[in-house]
Amino acid sequence: MRLLTFGDSWTAGHGVETDIKYKENAHPIEGKGFIVNLRRFNSWPRYVAEKLDCVFVNNGYCGVGNHDIYKEVKILFDDNMIENDDVFIIMFSYPHRYRDKKPENNPIEVFQKLETLLSPYKRFYFNSFYPTFKDEDGFDTKTLPDYFINPDGTMVDLLRNYEISNDVSVWEYESRSVWKNEKNLWCGDYHPNLLGYKLIAEEIINQIQTKL
């Protein structure tokens, strides 16, 4: 079994670094490979894979929209890189990211295309910092399959509750109470720290282990 994970910066691991000078180094441009690898190899996919005792590939990329996530999944199929026992976890991004420039980035359409592609495989969907279908008029999240975990909630809820209960930062660069500025949070301006990503991994394991 292999764990294949997809998402934006909340999957890519932005925020595990402790030095704020790296904050804007989001892409693997020349000279920035170290920080990209630091993030990817210490984000939640690593800790989920450890619990499942399997190898993993973290296909998270900072700044991508949901349609870009779909394209990353499709590339693996087009290149015949998929194995029968692969397990997919999709951590959805902000549903309005690039939507004005990419009408196909409608979250309902993206989800349906992913379902068509992944139907023979074990797969799970989560929301990172914004509910994927929150603004889709008339869409009933109760119709979603049980492997779309908590479609009306986000990992922000998990981290907020942990911070309140334990009085400890779970956010990048020791930030606190970032949910109080919802606008910036929903636009992706905040990320978990290492503890936050470990908590996300624990939640994912709790939700998927009995479904595998």
Image: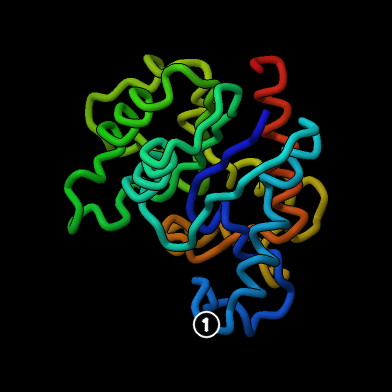
In the shown orientation, is residue 195 left or right of residue 155? right
Question: Farthest residue in the front direction?
Answer: 80
**Residue at position x 46%, y 17% from top?**
120
Residue toward you, 187 or 212: 212
Percent x, y of residue 100? 18, 56
Which residue is denoted by mark 1 in the rendering?
30
Identified by mark 1, the residue type is Glu
**Left/right of residue 184 with respect to residue 85 in the rendered view:** left
Q: Nearer the viewer, residue 114 or 93?
A: 114
User: Is the residue marked by circle 1 packed among few (<14), some (14-19), or many (20+) residues within 10 Å?
Assistant: few
Name the quadrant containing residue 194: bottom right
- Please indicate whether residue 184 sits to the left or right of residue 98 in the image: right
> Which element carries disc 1, helix, strand or loop?
loop
Where does residue 155 sit, x and y in percent of width and height? 59, 43
Q: Residue at x 76, y 44 (%)?
A: 47
Whether residue 145 is situated above or below residue 164 in the rendered picture: above
Q: Quadrant of the N terminus?
A: top right
